[in-house]
Amino acid sequence: MPTHNYENPSEKQDLSHVESGQHESEELDEHGFTKRKPISDRECIYKCLDNNRQMAGLDRKQVARLCDEFAIEKTDEQIKSEYPPL
């Protein structure tokens, strides 16, 4: 088997600082893979509204108003008193 005579001239580098680590918003599943932690229903609704601010067929002012309303964190009692309950 033929061999080569090339040697890499660069110095070996420690790249452990660029390794992917577990973020605070992630958790491990049963197989050891990272996955995002579940989010609340309110946060899910806010993300959907925020992603659709410029969607054709929707009233932009209404979507902006709802985004502002859902962005504010509320207590459990306030959320339970809303209609429809979230």
Image: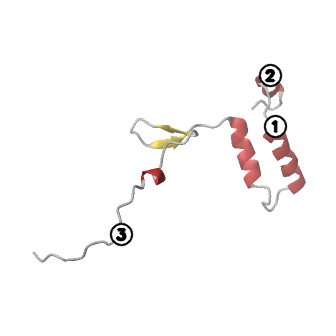
Q: How is the image coloured?
A: secondary structure
Front of the two marks 3 and 2: 3
Residue visible at 43% across and 43% down in the picture: 33
Side (left or right) of 74 relative to 28: right
Looking at the rendered structure, the kind of residue marked 3 is Ser
Mark 3 element type: loop
Q: How many marks?
A: 3
Marks 1 and 2 sit apart, C-alpha to C-alpha, by: 14 Å
Q: Which residue is mark 1?
A: 72
Q: Residues within 10 Å of mark 3 (few under 14, many from 20)?
A: few
Marks 3 and 1 sit apart, C-alpha to C-alpha, by: 53 Å
N-terminal label among 3 and 1:
3
| Residue 70 x %, y % | 80, 40
Residue visible at 86% across and 56% down in the picture: 60
Front of the two marks 3 and 1: 3
Mark 2 element type: helix
Residue toward you, 65 or 25: 25
Q: Which residue is mark 2?
A: 77
Looking at the rendered structure, the kind of residue marked 2 is Glu
Mark 1 element type: loop
Side (left or right) of 43 relative to 5: right
| Residue 69 x %, y % | 84, 40
Q: Residues within 10 Å of mark 1 (few under 14, many from 20)?
A: few
Looking at the rendered structure, the kind of residue marked 1 is Ile
